[in-house]
Image (spheres, rainbow, N blue to C red):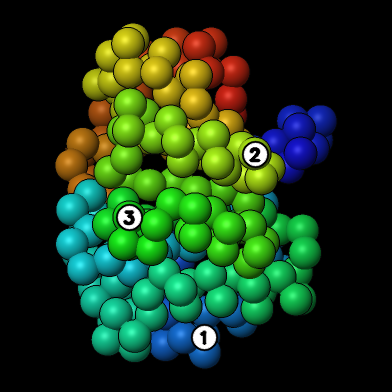
């Protein structure tokens, strides 16, 4: 719905990211409200994890601070619920890693995410071939399963993602971890038309 509205308005989506619980849990909900008030179309809320292999030092340190504040997946869901009491419309995507979800259990996680008011889930280290059950559970509760694709993604991987993904595609425009500076615009642009054509979804770069 958000992306359909933006398309009608001829606008791109602004999707900021913050780590839940950083610098302290009490700041998270006011920060989310401030982002929404400043024009965020979707908010990606990072779930702290002890081994964020795809993230650079800035997000790694934010996760470390949040974990020291005892912010795990249960607390993240509570924070989303608190945000929903003041903002019922701005989409929130939970972004993180498989381990906390596996530890909680898929069903408990999905049910908790639905109760909290999350709109989507992006699990960095869940490839599509391991995401069929989670994607089905999310879709049954009107939540999106968002996947990563990259300029190096094969046509086979794009097809796998297209069968499961909804919401939007997170297009990894940098090689290496988040925060890296080696950006190849030609390489990025070359794969975008294929991804858009196969997935029929908005692509976030």
Residue topped by disc 1: 27
Q: Nearer the viewer, residue 102 or 162?
A: 102
Q: Are marks 3 and 1 in contact (CB under 8 Å)?
A: no
Horizontal arrangement in the rendering, residue 144 relative to residue 90 (left or right): left
Q: Nearer the viewer, residue 181 or 135?
A: 135
Q: Quadrant of residue 115?
A: bottom right
Q: CA distance from mark 2 to mark 3?
A: 19 Å
| SS category of the residue bearing label 3 | helix
Q: Residue at coordinates 56% horizontally, 63% vertically from top-left?
A: 112
Q: Residue at coordinates 50% horizontally, 26% vertically from top-left?
A: 164
Q: Quadrant of residue 82?
A: bottom right
Camera-nearest label, 1 or 2: 2
Position of residue 31 measured from the top left corner of the image (x, y, whole percent): 57, 77
Position of residue 26 measured from the top left corner of the image (x, y, whole percent): 52, 89
Camera-nearest label, 3 or 1: 3
Quadrant showing the N terminus: top right
Residue topped by disc 2: 140
Q: CA distance from mark 3 to mark 1?
A: 27 Å
For mark 2, does the 10 Å Cα neighbourhood hold few (<14), some (14 to 19), or many (20 or more) residues? few
């Amino acid at each position: 719905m958000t992306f359909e509205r933006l398309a009608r308005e001829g606008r791109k989506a602004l999707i900021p990211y913050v780590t839940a619980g950083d610098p302290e849990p009490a700041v998270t909900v006011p920060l989310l409200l401030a982002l929404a008030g400043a024009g965020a179309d979707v908010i990606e809320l990072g779930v702290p994890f002890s081994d964020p292999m795809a993230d650079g030092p800035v997000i790694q340190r934010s996760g470390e601070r949040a974990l020291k504040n005892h912010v795990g997946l249960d607390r993240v869901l509570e924070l989303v619920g608190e945000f929903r009491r003041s903002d019922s419309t701005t989409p929130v995507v939970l972004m993180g890693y498989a381990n906390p979800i596996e530890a909680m259990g898929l069903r408990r996680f999905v049910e908790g995410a639905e109760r909290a008011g999350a709109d989507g889930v992006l699990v960095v280290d869940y490839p599509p071939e391991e995401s069929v059950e989670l994607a089905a559970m999310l879709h049954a509760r009107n939540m999106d399963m968002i996947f990563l694709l990259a300029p190096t993604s094969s046509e086979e991987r794009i097809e796998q993602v297209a069968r499961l993904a909804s919401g939007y595609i997170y297009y990894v425009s940098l090689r290496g971890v988040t925060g890296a500076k080696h950006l190849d615009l030609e390489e990025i642009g070359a794969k975008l038309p294929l991804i858009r054509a196969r997935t029929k979804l908005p692509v976030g770069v």
